[in-house]
Image (tube, coloured by chain):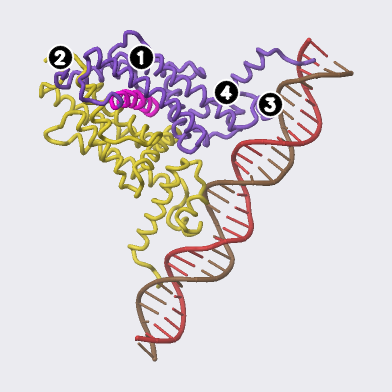
Chain colours: A yellow, B purple, C red, D brown
Amino acid sequence: MARVSQEHLDARRRQILDGAARCFARNGFHGTSMQDVLKEVGLSAGAVYRYFPGKEDIIAAITEETFATIRGAFEEASRMSPPPTPDVLLSRVLGRVLAGEVHGLERRTFAALAVQLWSETLRDGRLAAQLDEGYATMRAAWTRLVEAYRDAGLLGGDVAADHVARTMIATAQGFIVQEALFGDVTPEVLENGLRGLMSMGPQKAS
Amino acid sequence: MARVSQEHLDARRRQILDGAARCFARNGFHGTSMQDVLKEVGLSAGAVYRYFPGKEDIIAAITEETFATIRGAFEEASRMSPPPTPDVLLSRVLGRVLAGEVHGLERRTFAALAVQLWSETLRDGRLAAQLDEGYATMRAAWTRLVEAYRDAGLLGGDVAADHVARTMIATAQGFIVQEALFGDVTPEVLENGLRGLMSMGPQKAS
DNA sequence: TTGTCAAGAATGAACGTTCGTTTTAAGTTG
DNA sequence: CAACTTAAAACGAACGTTCATTCTTGACAA
């Protein structure tokens, strides 16, 4: 038997996913042809189709890993104890996300992949359901976090915790967009910017 | 002569753009075939190709209008005098953007179109250049706005105005993403959420 | 150690389909 | 009828995928 080692098979699979991720980040899922992927990973069609039944399955595998990374960054931060202030917390999330060790991608490339993925989610119900579920969990966790801020006396009693949580998430998402489009985002920009905004309000009504 | 009126020609052109925009928001630029567009607008291939040289040109026309809408909402808000606080200002921007009167689209559909457009920008240098230019102008205007906040004593002297401006823009962008993906965004969420965050900082060091 | 050999892994040309676009012919209107 | 618009068939190119074939691997006999 000429069966190669399991390590070899795993490495091949990863090689395909990483190469495909680079292609997808660069040209989108539909702007990338299988031939583009084949050239990028340096394998022939037959080889790739031995590891994945089709293009859709490659896309699915990549989206799953990417979702997990982003969601993981948010959830890990929301569990920090004691919770840092929002500026520090979100800066940490962004730093983790843009580190993007997922497919061996550069910061900006990973941000681009995230944007492509959101856009693909708009046309694929399965992806949308996957994202919906993750988002609901994440949003709940961050709402609890904001309630903790309130308990600690950092936040007044007149604003909806859910709205604050969604605004925090939106800020991080917006910076992912900016990194993908313009590429000069660092966690410090978020941290400084949000700290500035946080200083602009009235006294908190405790 | 069977030449129809100029109004008719303009209406046809708009009919094509609006229908194509619906398709593109739903399935992305590359997930939409010309046949999809033809069916949506109720015209034949020959008719559409009389008004536009090709698919690329339809995409270009739509992106231009969409960019202009978003950029317009940001710039209009930044010119308000006296400038409202960030929560009110950004809520206004989001309200204008999600009104999306551009192609007769629903709020969520317009947000989806914006996301599709960002994703397309990542693979089209011409679009990227267009967006870069608009973003640079916008960012400069909002930086001046933040400086005005500082002059008014709302913001301490130790944070970079540019960082605050980018964070504000990111927040609005993030909510556009959320509206596209999950669809339950209202300007009030942003306004309340940001007001909450603004109340969470230390006293401003004037 | 070395040589052998089948089974697994990889190849790349070719397939049917669908894409964006063009052409051609029929229809419509002042 | 002349000027122009529309419909529909047809085009080459490119798509995702398949398959007959070739190469490579590693267990095993000597």
Callout 4 crowding tier (Cα within 10 Å): few <14, some 14–19, many ≥20: many
| Residue B200 vertical position relative to residue A18 in the rendered view, above or below | above
Callout 1 crowding tier (Cα within 10 Å): few <14, some 14–19, many ≥20: many
**Going 52% across and 24% down the picture, which residue do you hit?**
B64
Depth check, mark 3 against mark 1: the one in front is 1
Q: Give the range drawn in magenta.
A: B163-181
Separation of disc 2 and disc 3 at Cα?
62 Å
Callout 2 secondary element: loop
> For mark 4, what is the residue?
B17
Residue A30 is left or right of residue B157, and the answer is right
| Nearer-N-terminus badge (3/1) | 3
Callout 1 secondary element: helix
Residue B61 rendering spot, x and y as whole percentages: 56, 25
| Nearer-N-terminus badge (1/4) | 4
Callout 3 secondary element: helix
> For mark 1, what is the residue?
B92
